[in-house]
Image (tube, rainbow, N blue to C red):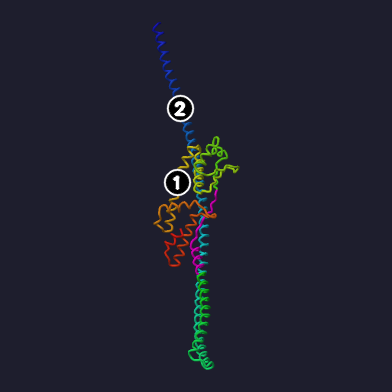
Amino acid sequence: MVLAGVAIFAAASAAGLVLGIWWGRRALKGKLREAERQASEILKEAERQAEIKRKEASLQAKEEAYRIKAEVEREMAQKREELLRLEKRLQQRENNIDKRVDLLDAKEAELERKEGELKAREQRVQEKERQYEELLQEERQRLEHLSGVTAEEAKKLLMERMEEEAKYEAAKRIKEIEDELREQATKRAQEIIALAVQRYAGEYVAEKTVSLVNLPAEEMKGRIIGREGRNIRAFEAATGVDLIIDDTPEAVIVSSFNPVRREVARLALERLVSDGRIHPARIEEVVSQVEEEIEQSIKEAGNQAAFDLGIHDLHPELIKLVGRLKYRTSYGQNVYQHSLEVAFLCGIMAAELNLNVKQAKRAGL
């Protein structure tokens, strides 16, 4: 009886074990199928996300290509406009050169005509001299026949009369020659000056006693003034200019009759505004930096002027003085550019007169 129970228990246990193993395998297979399903969904989601990314990348690439194309087209349009402007300037200069050539041809023809007239005058003078000789001979014979004076007396009277006539004719001829030479000299001088001005096409920009500095925002005026006006006082003390802050929107005015100080102040203020750090110590630092740069710019301008004129033996102090002219004006014209123009014009006129070109440029400068 006991053995039968044990056998039944063992059989039940074995059946339960088999059933558990079967059920476990079935559950495992279900989990595997679920895992495969999730993996498939994850793969599909990844592929969908990849497709979205690819489309976004393609769209961005197309947008970038369109932007680059638009930028290139804009640059090409600017280049075309610049080329058109250059072509117009070249055409204008070519027309001016043609006009100058025509003018010189006309002047040459005028000179040839004057030379012909001068030769004709000389021939007329020679003819008058011959006539005077004939009249003199006739007068001598008539005096000897009618007056009954001696030959010596007649000769003396005739010489006095001839001397008076010769003086009159000589004075008249001298005046004609002087007037003619004066007219020719005036025309020649005008031609040389006109030719020099035509051959030198300089430009200058009139400067004023004030400079305008634009601000990014109206609130920047308060930062420039500073607490209790410390910043503006420090700036004016460091630069030696007057800083005018009025109702002008988003701008301040730098005023000074010294163009070098005004330029230093303008550049320093622009840097301070761009940097954003505005306080007395920073102001002194920036002004000092700009002063050094302006000093270097003055030297470079002087050296450039000497190089452009072909003058290589100027004293360093003189070069520095020439460079400072870049920041000075006279009657609305930049003195630096005006000095270069005068030097170039002197050189051109010296070349026309076969004089020392280098010395003329140096004197003009």
Looking at this view, name the residue that lies furthest to the right.
Answer: 247
Q: Residue 290 in the image: state x and y as whole percent.
A: 46, 44
Is residue 198 within the magenta segment?
A: yes
Looking at this view, name the residue that lies furthest to the top.
Answer: 1
Q: Nearer the viewer, residue 22 or 159?
A: 159
Q: What is the total number of numbered labels drawn onto the structure image?
A: 2
Residue at (46, 65) in percent of width and height:
349
Q: With respect to residue 317, does 174 lie above or below?
A: below
Is residue 20 at least partly visible in the picture? Answer: yes
Residue at (49, 88) in percent of width and height:
155
Amino acid found under the numbered disc labelled 2: Ala
Q: Residues within 10 Å of mark 1 (few under 14, many from 20)?
A: few
Is residue 113 at least partly visible in the picture? Answer: no
Q: Nearer the viewer, residue 1 or 184?
A: 184
Residue at (42, 64) in percent of width and height:
356
Which residues lie in the magenta part?
Answer: 188-209
Q: Locate the N terminus and report the quarter of the image it occupies.
A: top left
Q: Nearer the viewer, residue 74 or 166?
A: 166
Question: Which residue is disc 2 drawn over?
Answer: 35
Amino acid found under the numbered disc labelled 1: Glu
Question: Which residue is disc 1 drawn over?
Answer: 293
Q: Residues within 10 Å of mark 2 (few under 14, many from 20)?
A: few
For mark 1, give the secondary structure. Answer: helix
Q: Residue 83 in the image: state x and y as whole percent.
A: 50, 57
Q: Compute the Cα span from label 2 to label 1.
A: 74 Å
Nearer the N terminus, badge 2 or badge 1? 2
Whether tag 2 and tag 1 are in contact, CB under 8 A, the answer is no
Q: Nearer the viewer, residue 66 or 299?
A: 299
Q: Residue 43 in the image: state x and y as whole percent.
A: 46, 33
Q: With respect to residue 116, does 241 lie above or below?
A: above
Q: Residue 113 in the image: state x and y as whole percent.
A: 51, 76
